[in-house]
Image (spheres, helix red, strand yellow):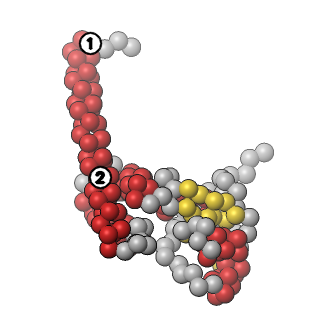
Amino acid sequence: MTLEPKTTHQIAAVRTQIDNIDEQILKLINQRAQAAQKVAELKRQLCDNADFYRPEREAQVLKRIKDLNPGPLNSETIRWIFREIMSACLALEQPLKVAFLGPAGTFTQAATLKHFGHAIDTASMATIPEVFREVESGACHYGVVPIENSSEGIISHTLDTFIRSNLNICGEVSLRIHQHLLS
């Protein structure tokens, strides 16, 4: 398939426009990162052990962005993009370490990355009590454990561990699970 010279010129013009927009986006993302660093600096001035990760603030930002989104990108895509930008900016303030149940590649790891973004340090744990111990000891800032799943329903072992712990739930992640049996 060959394109007419006029069409080729039009495509080149639109690609130049895209390149210019990409440069603007890059500048704005870095401006946002600088603003996040300033927030971190101000928090450190107020308190030696300030909370850098504020789940309620992130929820507000994501809701606001979703409400402002005119499309054509759908709200879930926009949410994912902003989750990653916020994760990267938070890593500049204070890198988060998050423990999760299971080896790499599990649904719990997927939930961890969905909630915190990819700019975190993760630690996989073999058991639910190990996740709790990592957070209680301060080795990890947060932990992600299953509360409910499609095969077992309520995970009573997780709820029992919460009863014995002084940790609190600070967020919830829902994942759509699609399993395919292939033979």
Instruction: Find disc 1 in the rendering and name its residue.
Output: 4
Percent coordinates x, y for residue 73 in the rendering: 33, 49
How crowded is the residue under tag 2: few (<14 C-alpha within 10 Å), some, or many (20+)? some
Name the residue at 64% across, 88% down.
163
Q: Is residue 141 left or right of residue 148?
A: left
Name the residue at 24% across, 11% down.
5
- Which numbered circle lies on residue 78? none
Q: Is residue 68 left or right of residue 60?
A: left
> Which residue ends up furthest to the bottom in the rendered image?
163
> Which residue ends up furthest to the right in the rendered image?
183
Q: Quadrant of the C terminus?
A: top right
Q: Amino acid at mark 1?
A: Glu
| Viewer-side label of 2, 1 | 2
Percent coordinates x, y for residue 125 in the rendering: 70, 64
* SS at badge 2: helix
Name the residue at 67% across, 74% down.
133
Name the residue at 63% across, 84% down.
165
Residue 9 in view, yes or no: yes
Q: Amino acid at mark 2?
A: Gln
Q: Quadrant of residue 168?
A: bottom right
- Please report whichever mark, 2 or 1, sits nearer to the chain's N-terminal start: 1
Q: Can you say whether 125 is above or below 78 in the image? A: below
Percent coordinates x, y for residue 95 in the rendering: 48, 58
Gap in Å between the C-alphas at discs 2 and 1?
45 Å
How crowded is the residue under tag 1: few (<14 C-alpha within 10 Å), some, or many (20+)? few
Q: Is residue 141 left or right of residue 78?
A: right
* SS at badge 1: loop
Percent coordinates x, y for residue 129 in the rendering: 71, 75
- Which numbered circle lies on residue 34? 2
Q: Can you say whether 80 is above or below 9 in the image? A: below
